[in-house]
Image (spheres, rainbow, N blue to C red):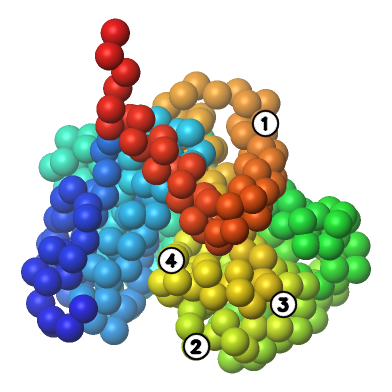
Amino acid sequence: MKGEGFEDLIRSWDGEEVLARFDEPAGAWMFVCVHSTLMGPATGGVRMKTYATPHEALLDCMRLSSLMTLKTAVSGLPMGGGKSVIAVPEVPAPGSEERRRVMERFGMMVGSLQGTYWSGPDMNTSEQDMDVLWDVAPYTFGRSPARGGSGDSAPDTAEGVLHGIKATVARAFGSPDLSGRTVLVEGVGGVGSRLAELLAKENASLLVADIDQERVTEIAERLAAGMVAPGDVIGAECDVYAPCAVGWTVNEETIPRLRCRAVAGAANNQLGELVHDAERLRRAGILYAPDYVINAGGAFHLIGYETLGWSRDEVDRHITGIGDTMTRIFERADEQGISTELAAERIAKDRLAKAGNPPTR
Ligand code: PHE
């Protein structure tokens, strides 16, 4: 997309609706992208981040939003896909007055949609932020248990990713046993750090990387993991590369340099170009666990507890099921000679097509 303005970008997207707001007090751009409401109200978290340009922030928001449509559909959740981004010059400190104000003003935008879009936690946003949002826009997942919410979904996201990694390793190596398998966790934030803990318990041989030197050193020491410099992640030799931070790390330029047998991690939007890069991975003999399938644990937690009335057992059952879904996708991809991404997309699109054409009585 060449144009610097928003119009070309928005028109190149197949979503339903885009809201854009320039927030003068914070110098922030705020976007809500509703990709699809075919399966129900759109949902997806709100990401707070510094971007090079508002154009880049909107592009990220649109792509993450499309991915949420696939995530809820492939997971069989009765909601559609959306996402929002607060593009700040600098991320305001959690708990600060500035932070609360930004969330309130963002909440007014979400509120104006009257439930077409449900927000929730994502990169750099927490249950405290969701509490603030909820007061302005009660279309918000993940507020704190004290405020009646289901709280932090990151541990369940990590748990689901672990099941997905086991299914991936089983496919690639013939056994789900992780002991001795080298797993490189890139990004040890809310989800990545918990995933690293779970992997350590499974006796995986752990490598960790993060741009936050202090955080990564603490985790590496505590879990007896090796450290990889952020710039060396792509060429690092490992069995499983688990991207758990920013997206777009697996692309035309990086794929030839990967030295792993599988890519299976928590980050949203891992591939630069969804279909093409998945095919490149397939040709390179690298097994790819589609991101929106393996990281659906958070969605099961938030939507399961807060709108479907699930018990802990039901949430657990769905999170464990991520491993089975992954296995089914691997099998289908092999049978049809297509990438795992395409196999997952076909499952999602079949469900969306059925939602769009309800059976006649
Ligand atoms: N942001 C997380 C995800 O991408 C959690 C989330 C799921 C937030 C569903 C809102 C709705 O899966």
Residue on which the image places disc 1: 317
Above or below, 287 relative to 250? above
Residue on which the image places disc 3: 260
Question: Is the N terminus in the top left, top right, bottom left or bottom right quadrant?
Answer: bottom left
Q: Amino acid at mark 4?
A: Leu
- Tell me which label, 1 or 2, sits earlier in the chain: 2
Residue on which the image places disc 2: 253
- CB atoms of marks 1 and 2 within 8 Å: no
- Which numbered mark, 3 or 1, is in the foreground of this view? 3
- CB atoms of marks 3 and 4 within 8 Å: no
Element assignment for label 2: loop
Residue 3: which quarter of the image?
A: bottom left
- Tell me which label, 2 or 4, sits earlier in the chain: 2
Q: Nearer the viewer, residue 73 or 104?
A: 73
- Within 10 Å of the Cα at label 2, are there few (<14), some (14-19), or many (20+) other Cα atoms? few
- Tell me which label, 3 or 2, sits earlier in the chain: 2
Q: Nearer the viewer, residue 113 or 287?
A: 287
- Within 10 Å of the Cα at label 4, are there few (<14), some (14-19), or many (20+) other Cα atoms? some
Residue on which the image places disc 4: 274
- Tell me which label, 3 or 4, sits earlier in the chain: 3
Q: Amino acid at mark 3?
A: Cys
